[in-house]
């Protein structure tokens, strides 16, 4: 059964709930910057997916943990400065997109989905990190990707 389309009321949430959702996302970014693995991974549901910028980065939380924890153990995290975040919801499902700034990669975009877990806390179910590509540069970017993928 297809759910009915969302109404304007579906996109309205009280400020306290939005603050909870934003706090989870902000805590994720802050913990990554500090290389604080326990706090970082606590923001994700156990079954969460992390989809990174590389086509091969479609990881379960455990796969992503195996990638990230050695970096965190060395005190090496990653710092993305979020701005221009939009959070919306339909029922109990919250989804967001945000622009990110990173010293090495420039402007990126993050997006994801959060649900309230059985303990009452919001957790990230899926996070997607992607490069933003100006439309005028897309042909060159596609050519570079194809050249990199060629045998």
Image (cartoon, grey):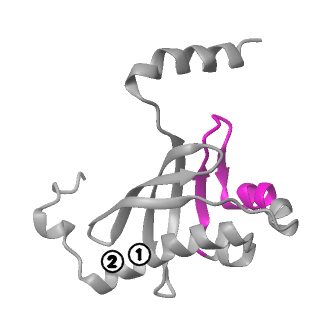
Q: Are marks 1 and 2 in contact (CB under 8 Å)?
A: yes
Of all residues, the one furthest to the front in this rendering is 103
Residue at the (61%, 46%) spot, across then down: 52
Q: Position of residue 7 (x, y in %)?
A: 12, 62
Lateral position of residue 34 relative to residue 132, left or right: right
> Residue 43: x, y in percent?
58, 74
Q: Is residue 9 left or right of residue 80?
A: left
Which quadrant, please, contains the C terminus? Answer: top right
Judged left or right of residue 101, residue 42 is right
Q: Which mark is residue 18?
A: 2
**Foreground of the two, 104 or 46:** 104
Task: Please tell me whether mark 1 sits on a helix, a strand or a loop.
Answer: helix
Tell me which corner region of the image, top left, top right, bottom left or bottom right, holds residue 3: bottom left
Determine which residue is flagged by label 1.
Answer: 21
The residue sitting at the left extreme is 8
Q: Is residue 60 magenta?
A: yes
Q: Which residues are magenta?
A: 43-68
Element under label 2? helix
Which residue is located at x 27 percent, y 82 percent? 15
Q: Is residue 104 above or below residue 89?
A: above
Q: Is residue 123 visible in this depiction of the protein?
A: no
From the viewer's side, name the closer residue of 149 and 102. 102
Q: Is residue 48 above or below residue 119?
A: above
């Amino acid at each position: 059964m297809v759910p009915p389309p969302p109404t304007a009321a579906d996109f309205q949430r009280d400020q306290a709930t939005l603050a909870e959702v934003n706090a989870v996302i902000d805590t994720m970014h802050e913990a990554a910057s500090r290389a604080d693995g326990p706090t970082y991974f606590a923001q994700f549901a156990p079954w969460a997916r992390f989809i990174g910028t590389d086509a091969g980065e479609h990881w379960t939380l455990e796969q992503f943990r195996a990638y990230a924890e050695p970096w965190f153990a060395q005190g090496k995290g990653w710092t993305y400065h979020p701005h221009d975040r939009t959070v919306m919801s339909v029922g109990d499902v919250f989804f967001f997109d945000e622009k990110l700034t990173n010293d090495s990669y420039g402007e990126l975009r993050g997006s994801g989905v959060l649900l309230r877990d059985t303990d009452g806390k919001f957790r990230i179910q899926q996070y997607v990190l992607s490069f933003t590509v100006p439309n005028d540069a897309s042909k060159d970017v596609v050519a570079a990707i194809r050249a990199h993928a060629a045998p």
